[in-house]
Amino acid sequence: MKYIVPTLFITILLSSCKTETKEKVDHTGPSTASIISDQKNPNFRWDAATVYFLLTDRFNNGNPSNDINFERTNETGELRGFMGGDIQGITEKINDGYFSKLGINAIWFTPVIEQVHGDTDEGTGNTYAYHGYWAKDWTTLDPNFGTEKDLQTLVKTAHDKGIRVLLDVVLNHTGPVTEKDPVWPEEWVRTAPTCEFTTYQNTTDCTLVANLPDVLTASEEPVKLPDALLAKWKAEGRLSSELDELDLFFDRTGYPRAPRYYIIKWLTDYIHQFGVDGFRVDTVKHVNENAWAELYTEASAAFELWKKKNPEKVLDSNSFYMVGEVYNYGISGGREFDFGNKKVDYFANGFKSLINFELKTDAAKDYESIFSKYSKLLHTTLKDKSVLNYITSHDDSQPFDKERNNPYRAANVLLLTPGAAQIYYGDETARDLTIEGTSGDATLRSFMNWEELDSIPKKAEILNHWRKVGSFRNNHPSIGAGIHNRLASKPYVFSRYLKNDEYVDKVVIGLDLPKGKKSIVVKGFFGDGTKLYDAYSATEVVVANGKVVLENDFDIALLEVKEY
């Protein structure tokens, strides 16, 4: 790595957006231009963010020449090998305006650091590290995903459009042992026992699964760098520079040369070099929580230094953002995660947000039950913190609506529930999650279904709905961060209100509305004579007698104050 600060995984945040150059294939359906801001959103907030999460290898292949490296050519199980997606492919879609039209203000993609070279079979068919979670060398990128120049271009392109970038970081484990990838020294990792997940100790002091060496993140004992890593750096002509950087880091911080501090240095290098805006942190509950506080301290310092050195590139005054994957954490747990014999407050250890595993089951409830619950918890127990909601993901075998029977309701629940929202690639296009011949998580990780948008009109219609609701959400941080209030039960109408210093954001939304002529209550929120705009049907209305009247075949209305 050519710098002294790290970033491992990328989540790109799009904060409001300009209307982009027309896509190579434009699947907009009815025009969404009216609900895409002409300016970058100056009121972006992480607690109202819309994050697009994708597997780098499964989204878009921008550079077919990097599809095969390190002789990764063995036959694999279904969907368990590399398929060609890369950093350049993500950048192409940023430039095409795909994310902007969807209202995305953040992109998180799976780790792009160098992965183990070999394949392994743990009972699910031969598997390569296409997913990015099997680190071999934290200090460089895997050529299957791209180069540092590719990553620099991606971050710059995203930032130019007001998009923030989150890197996915892994501190807990290395990649598995293969014929090509020896185990790290015992001073660095443990290879047993396997976690049992019933206590704090047998969740942190163990290997996540068999043959996934666990980094000794709790150790304070100095260790030497592995001979294999030193030999690799020497062969690549960067041994001296890597060692010099480590000397500077440890001299500056005073940390012992224990395993976690090396990796913290390598991860924060990406912040120094590229100016990424945050980390999505993997396998949080399997690492002692103090390590995350240390990571956040170093990451924040790196981010502030980058902003000081690059004032012309700074998007806003937001501090560095860290969201954690504490597997099975739910918003109802509040500030603490319960291991059975110990409770841990990860929000007090560097995290501003945790991924919420609860919405996928809450999603089957009525809208008001969901929205009122989340609004209450976020403004009381979790005040000044947040959660990142999702309904499908890369390793959740029980997502909401796995058969994709109701993608419209899925959009409404995910994008209108208070909190930040994580769209998993293909949620917006009803990508199939039930692939024949797959085993385990692989069924959730097919290549993005771009072709279906051309061949199946229904897919384009679904995408258009997600775009309309997503763009409205992006333009109105009150949806994610504001106070929720029900205005009417039948038809269901609610408001969101956000006030921050001099900034006020107010919207009214109707769901499950009747087709044809419909009356929407706004009394007590928008006064008579107020000119409103329904961003879903592109219709101007005026409040009279505490309500507005629309006539169309849509069952949803997205009302905002009409601006001239």
Image (cartoon, rainbow, N blue to C red):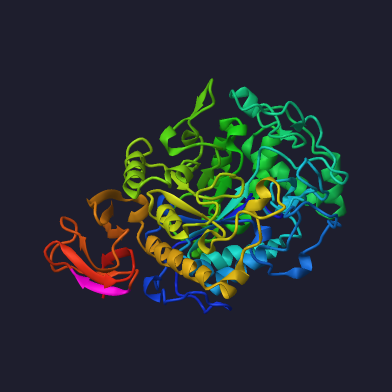
Q: In this rendered view, identify the residue nearer to me: 129 or 225.
A: 129
**Horizontal and vertical percent for residue 376?**
32, 41
Horizontal relation, residue 91 to residue 536: left or right? right
Q: Is residue 216 above or below residue 524?
A: above
Taking the magenta stretch, the answer to whether it contains residue 541 is: yes
**Horizontal and vertical percent for residue 347?**
47, 36
Q: Main secondary structure of the magenta part?
A: strand
Residue at the image point whose x is 69% and y is 59% from the top: 57
Q: Is residue 38 above or below residue 165?
A: below
**Horizontal and vertical percent for residue 110?**
63, 53
Q: Residue 500, can we see it?
A: no
Q: Is residue 350 above or below residue 305?
A: above
Q: How many marks?
A: 0
Residue at the image point whose x is 27% and y is 57% from the top: 504
Query: Where, quadrant-wise, is the C terminus in this rendering?
Result: bottom left
Residue 183: image quadrant is top right
Residue 456: image quadrant is bottom right
Q: Residue 272, can we see it?
A: yes
Residue at the image point whose x is 44% and y is 72% from the top: 18
**Horizontal and vertical percent for residue 531?**
20, 70
Q: In this rendered view, identify the residue nearer to me: 305 or 538.
A: 538
Stretch of the chain drawn in magenta:
538-542
Q: In this rendered view, identify the residue nearer to me: 398 or 153.
A: 398
Taking the magenta stretch, the answer to whether it contains residue 351 is: no
